[in-house]
Structures are given as structure tokens and as C-alpha cells.
Image (cartoon, rainbow, N blue to C red):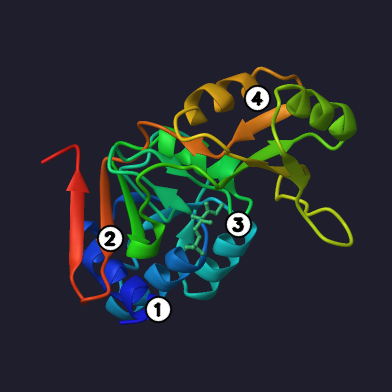
């Protein structure tokens, strides 16, 4: 089965966790977009949904869903991820929506992450950690991140990528197996850094679409 098939299967599995009339937080990315497509085929038009990006906001409205602001806790959050380990730690932000995603995930009673098996990692060595930074001080902020001994690159080829919050993204290479949490904490301490894409304790269940057509579940809750 190809990656698209895995994403469709895992999306269909995640539909089992939905109830009409709940307040649903929604991440961003291609897997989430496939999930929305599958969800709209079934209905669930009574949902109120908090989107994590302008793009997802637009897609949801076009499909007739009620889009609302985050005012308190969502009942459920559904999102994808760029990399996940077996302890349900994640790297997110490939699409640049990491800050809003982290806010909604933090403010949700239950978090389900949907990925295909290519996203599963034993560790995060060799992966880039997305970091959202203020445009105002981006050059000095990048220097301070480099001062930590890290290899980084500003996202965007000809012109920098701009997030929905009007900020830049710096991608930080994780060169060692074990230091991701430490690196994320140190980066976060630098003024000008808005948020990092390291997500810890923000996934309750990870559903993994497999090449053989199955869906594996790793869960911290029953
Ligand atoms: C966006 C994200 C996405 O969840 C992540 O990039 C995965 O995207 P995709 O489902 O397209 O692989 O963190 O900020």
C-alpha cells in the first residue's frame, strides 16, 4: 500500500473517535486534509471545529463545518506529525502550523495523532526541528540558536516562509540521538523564539497506518 492509502486508512480509523456535537481541535497537513475529506463523506455536520491554520479553516468552511475560536478546552484534537517515537514524543511543524497546533493540543481533553508508518522513528537524529521566530529580531535570534552549537536554516528558498502568525520558521538539525528535549528547552529560552515543534505529552493515542493495510494503535489511555 502506498502512503496515500495508509493516510486514508488511518483517517478512517480515527473517525471512530468522533461524536457529533463535540468541540474538535484540528491540526494541519496533508493527513489532516485527508481526514477532513473522509469525515465529510460520513457527515458529522454537528461538530464545532477549532482549526490550527488558515488553510484548514478554509477547507472546513468550504465543506460546511462550523468553525469556532478556541475559548476553552476542546473535547478532542486530531492532528498529524512529521516524526513520532514509541513514547509518543513528536516533531511537528513541517507545514509551519506548530504554534497554533501546540496551543490547541495543550487545550484538548484527548489528543489523537494520525500518521503513516514512514513517520515512526526510534529517535530523532538527522531530523529538522521547526522553530517559529519573530521577524523583528530574526537575524540575532538565529545567531543565538547557532551559539548553542546547532546547524540551522531559515525556511524558504527565494523568500522566507511566513507562518499564519506572521513569523519565520527556522529548521534546526537534530544531530544527536538523545538531546532533543534539552535542545528544545534551550531554544525556547531565547527571546524572539515563539515556539518549537517538539511535542511531549501532547499525544494520548497515535494511530499508525501500515503498508500491509492495517492500523496500529499506541495509546497512553484506555
Ligand atoms: C503541520 C504539521 C503536520 O502535522 C505535519 O507536518 C505532518 O504533515 P503531513 O500530514 O502533510 O505529513 O505539523 O505544522
Residue 150 lies, with reference to residue 54, above or below; the image says above
Residue underneath mark 1: 4
Is 153 positioned to the left or the right of 28 in the image?
A: right
Q: Does the Cβ of the disc 4 residue fall within 8 Å of ligand 1?
A: no
Q: Does the Cβ of the disc 3 residue fall within 8 Å of ligand 1?
A: yes
Separation of marks 3 and 1 at Cα, in angstroms: 17 Å
| Upstream in sequence: badge 1 or badge 2 | 1
Q: Secondary structure at mark 1?
A: helix
Q: Identify the residue at horizontal 55%, vertical 40% (top origin).
A: 197
- Whether tag 2 and tag 4 are in contact, CB under 8 A, the answer is no
Q: Secondary structure at mark 3?
A: loop
Separation of marks 3 and 2 at Cα, in angstroms: 19 Å
- The label on residue 208 is 2
- Whether tag 1 and tag 2 are in contact, CB under 8 A, the answer is no
Q: Does the Cβ of the disc 2 residue fall within 8 Å of ligand 1?
A: no
Q: Residues within 10 Å of mark 3 (few under 14, many from 20)?
A: some
Q: Secondary structure at mark 2?
A: strand
Query: Which mark's residue is nearer the viewer, 3 or 4?
Result: 4
Q: Identify the residue at horizontal 19%, vertical 60% (top origin).
A: 216
Residue underneath mark 3: 95
Q: Secondary structure at mark 4?
A: helix
Amino acid at each position: 500500500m502506498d502512503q496515500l492509502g495508509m493516510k486514508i486508512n488511518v483517517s478512517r480509523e480515527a473517525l471512530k473517535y468522533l461524536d457529533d456535537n463535540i468541540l474538535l481541535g484540528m491540526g494541519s497537513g496533508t493527513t489532516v486534509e485527508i481526514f477532513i475529506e473522509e469525515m465529510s463523506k460520513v457527515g458529522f455536520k454537528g461538530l464545532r471545529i477549532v482549526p490550527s491554520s488558515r488553510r484548514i479553516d478554509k477547507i472546513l468552511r468550504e465543506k460546511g463545518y462550523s468553525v469556532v475560536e478556541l475559548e476553552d478546552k476542546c473535547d478532542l484534537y486530531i492532528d498529524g506529525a512529521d516524526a513520532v517515537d514509541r513514547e509518543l514524543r513528536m516533531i511537528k511543524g513541517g507545514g509551519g502550523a506548530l504554534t497554533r497546533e501546540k496551543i490547541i493540543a495543550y487545550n484538548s481533553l484527548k489528543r489523537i495523532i494520525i500518521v503513516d508508518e514512514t513517520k515512526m522513528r526510534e529517535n530523532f537524529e538527522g531530523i529538522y526541528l521547526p522553530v517559529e521566530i519573530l521577524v523583528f529580531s530574526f537575524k540575532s535570534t538565529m545567531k543565538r540558536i547557532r551559539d548553542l552549537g546547532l546547524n540551522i536554516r531559515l525556511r524558504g528558498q527565494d523568500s522566507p516562509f511566513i507562518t499564519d502568525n506572521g513569523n519565520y520558521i527556522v529548521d534546526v538539525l537534530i544531530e544527536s540521538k538523545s538531546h532533543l528535549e534539552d535542545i528544545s528547552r534551550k531554544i525556547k529560552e531565547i527571546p524572539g523564539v515563539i515556539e518549537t515543534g517538539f511535542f511531549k505529552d501532547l499525544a494520548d493515542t497515535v494511530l499508525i497506518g501500515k503498508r500491509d493495510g492495517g492500523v496500529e494503535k499506541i495509546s497512553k489511555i484506555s
